Image (cartoon, helix red, strand yellow):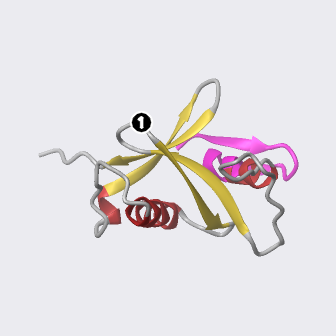
Amino acid sequence: MDETVHENVNKKVSLLTILLEQSKLNSSDDRGNSINYDDDDQLSLTIYLPNGDSITVFVPETSIVQDVIRKTLQSHQKKKLMPALEYTKPSMYELRIHEGMQQLLYIIPISIHN
């Protein structure tokens, strides 16, 4: 996993942690309205699905990767989005960060290699 030094804390943190921190500072809802968070509130994350569509989910600041995947699947199912995903098996998916012009979060099925 790519690690980088966070300037303010002067310790190594993962790229996902930095992205989560930035998300909290720059959050808005689906209509572009700013969201104000209390200390124990949630982060807004835009997750790109296997078909390229995106979905915005809100997760607690203390969430781990599996929490983000689970919340993404729950939100996808609740909204009845297509194509359907494997909702009962969040362990079939992984969360990846794509670095480029923007840092993007993708949920993708885990490949099974024999």
**Depicted 58 relative to depicted 48: above or below:** below
Please indicate whether residue 103 sits to the left or right of residue 94 in the image: right
Question: Does residue 36 sit above or below 45 in this rendering?
Answer: below
Give, as a three-letter code, the residue at label 1: Gly
**Is 17 in the magenta?**
yes
Decide if residue 107 is in sight here: yes
Judging depth in this view, the residue of 18 and 6 nearest the camera is: 18
Is residue 13 visible from the viewing direction of this image?
no
Position of 8 with respect to 103 (left or right) is right
Q: Which residue is mark 1?
A: 52
Identified at 75% across, 43% down, the residue is 5
Looking at the rendering, the stretch of residues picked out in magenta corresponds to 1-19
Q: Residues within 10 Å of mark 1 (few under 14, many from 20)?
A: few
Q: Is residue 97 magenta?
A: no
Viewer-closest of 14 and 36: 36
Residue at 84% of width from left, 62% of height from top? 36
Give above or below for 2 relative to 81: above
Q: Residue furthest top?
A: 101
